[in-house]
Image (spheres, coloured by chain):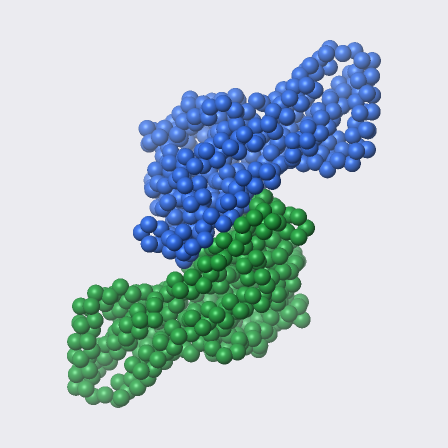
Chain colours: A green, B blue
Amino acid sequence: MFYAEMSRPELAALKESLEREYAGIKAGDLDLDLSRGKPGSTQLNMLTGMLDCISTAEDVRSESGFDYRNYGLLDGVPEAKQMFSELLGIPQQMIIVAGNSSLNLMYDTVVRCMLYGTPGRDGKCVPWIKQGEISFLCPAPGYDRHFAICRSLGIKMINIKMREDGPDMAEVKRIVESDSSVKGIWCCPKYSNPDGVTYSDSVVRDFAALRPAAPDFRIFWDNAYAVHCLYGKDVVLDDIFTECRKNGTEDSVFYFASTSKISFPGSGVAIFAASERNLAQIKPILGVQTIGFDKINQIRHVRYFGSADGIRMHMKNLAGLIRPKFDIVLSALDADLSDTGIAHWTHPHGGYFVSLYLLPGTAKRTYELCGAAGVKLTPAGATYPYGIDPADSNIRIAPTYPSNGELRTAMHVLTVCARLAATEKLLAEGA
Amino acid sequence: MFYAEMSRPELAALKESLEREYAGIKAGDLDLDLSRGKPGSTQLNMLTGMLDCISTAEDVRSESGFDYRNYGLLDGVPEAKQMFSELLGIPQQMIIVAGNSSLNLMYDTVVRCMLYGTPGRDGKCVPWIKQGEISFLCPAPGYDRHFAICRSLGIKMINIKMREDGPDMAEVKRIVESDSSVKGIWCCPKYSNPDGVTYSDSVVRDFAALRPAAPDFRIFWDNAYAVHCLYGKDVVLDDIFTECRKNGTEDSVFYFASTSKISFPGSGVAIFAASERNLAQIKPILGVQTIGFDKINQIRHVRYFGSADGIRMHMKNLAGLIRPKFDIVLSALDADLSDTGIAHWTHPHGGYFVSLYLLPGTAKRTYELCGAAGVKLTPAGATYPYGIDPADSNIRIAPTYPSNGELRTAMHVLTVCARLAATEKLLAEGA
């Protein structure tokens, strides 16, 4: 029965029963974690062969004889560029294969724009830090660590509504084309964090067609889940660079990807891609920052996966492992919440998260109740700029880390807490 | 015979004979490189076992069960902290074990100071970028990439004379204690790049006793060659943190080290160390920049070397390989230049370079002559701020990369070019 249709006595009785159930859970002394998009150990064990897949001097030498154990090659190992070029459909010459973290690349990219600027339409670079207050558009809910970069650097964040096919592009266009203090937008265009949304062709085309008021506006295109399909056929994301080329706006994109959720998180490789003009500005600065990234780890990825197809095959195997975890989450939500009317949730085709929308005003309370019962969630609000979910509704569920048994338990706790929080709220409102 | 004592006809005859020798060298079509402190392949082959020294899930797990294949541990693997703590004599809690490049750490540290500041004596952080023009002291000759960071970020560089026991501390003290726009100094305190100087105890104590005019002054202590002894007993560098603790100036030091010339350059690990107060400011910012560094590579170093003593033993073996290369350089200089009076050079106990001082006004010309004859040197001037050696005298020789045979050839070319440049200069002066 939908909670909204219940009488006060019915709600009160329900609340009491949920409280009893919650007390029982609390007594169980749980310690479970649904908070981060973090692979579980079974998933990591599938990669054990990667640890020692290179062993001789030959293995770390290029066809042309370059020794990857030594200094050099600022922009990465050619074989790795080729593999990721094929995987992502981006020309090799646009790619830098970097270190172990695309987050680090994104942070460094924003910092570089702050201190050095990025080429405007006339090619001139004016450091963002010299341009007064600047802003980023933040489609929300989104990735908390994107927002943390802006917050740390004092960049104002403007919420943009996420729809089922991507950000509200009418709003994006209106703001970007009128306000020259808007310098960037955070995008997670495929199997988005946390909603699992893949931007439609029309959204990608709208991005490419933007005529920003700021000559040095950049789209931060974090394609973190490019090959992370879980159900059915992989959804195709239109290529942003191809669309931009048609519009002469190629310079407006900074593209990021990584193998953090393909190989080992923290020991993968990160990828950056940008136009020739952007790279011509970036590489000399990057060459002051470092002599080069870890090329042995780059060639390790090439030797282990062999090719883009090797990565795709590995992702299929991984999906076989992760899919049951998503099924557990979705079944629990369906079983415990579908007849309550207090929640709706996403049914992602890929990525790392299920996004749960609770009765407005109850996400924080649900988070607290879960925490007190030993189930750690991503803090309510984290998926919004400044940690403030205007509706206090969204909870991001990360199913990959716990074992299947733990996940079942954690999900039950979550739905009990969500229902308890809803009855509290509805009773308080009616009082 | 000393060139300065030669008559003009003698000099002219010498020049002619050197020109003939140079022409012969040029005809030889050489392609040799003495330019960078880069290990040779024999040195790298000594580490082949490191490539596959971890192979199972057990190998990448901590004693406490932490899985280093997964996210987490922003400041590095405890076992690695312990090993480097022992190696460098720095308390573990002061250490961050980071990514593959200490240059990257140094660049990021300066950038962080620019954008966020660093705690002043009152604990407050004022971004350097908001403090008008700022300067760094640059003991010179020094490491070109230190100077490149300042140049890239628009930080003014002030030359400080290097003496046989470290920088001219009277001058350092005078400037640092009177000019609050001086925010930092670059130090390579042991087997320095390029002079091979180890700072004396008195110099280290003087650093610790500085009372900078700027409350947010920092000593960038790049201990790049901490365990890189080549001849005899390792020289002991006084511990800067210990001396600082006596003076209450522990906050003034940012300490850097790396395994770039211990394990694989580009695939080693970098180390940062700082006081509790500095780390308390830095870690939250670092946590916005990255989720963590490559922990698998960190534990790989621990498993391979086993302990600080394991590293020391490896460095002894390395020294056995590198020492003959230094001997070749020193013998060539001795044989070809000792009776000319046009040059003097360092006799380093460790590190990666021999520093050659030619007749003032001839380093650039020598560099050009070598280049045209197929021997690549570090550009003359590179070891000074803005690439300007006021005396146009210093040439940095990096003996590690070429084979011994190549090195002998390259050194002969260098001394011929140096002598030719000297005769040109002396004849032009006398004209």
In this orientation, does residue B372 appear?
no
Nearest the eye: A70 or B191? A70
What residue is rendered at 63% in x and 20% in y?
B344
As drawn, A220 above or below B169: below
**Image x and y of residue B156, in percent:** 55, 37
Query: Percent from the top left, x then y, of residue B203?
Result: 44, 24
State the residue at coordinates (54%, 52%).
Answer: A54
Q: Is residue B187 above or below residue A6?
A: above
Question: What residue lies at 58% left-to-right and 51% top-to-bottom?
Answer: A59
Could you tell me if residue A79 is visible in this image?
A: yes
Res B94 → quadrant: top left
Left or right of residue B294: residue A338: left
Total labels: the figure holds: 0
Quadrant in which the N terminus of chain B appears: top right
The residue sitting at 36% across, 73% down in the picture is A394
Taking the image as shown, residue A191 lies to the left or right of residue B79, namely right
- Where is residue A391? Give x, y as percent: 35, 74
The C terminus of chain B sits in image quarter:
top right
Q: Could you say where residue B111 lies in the image, as x and y percent from the top left?
A: 49, 46
- Position of A170 relative to A73 (above/below): below
Occupied quadrant, residue B249? top left
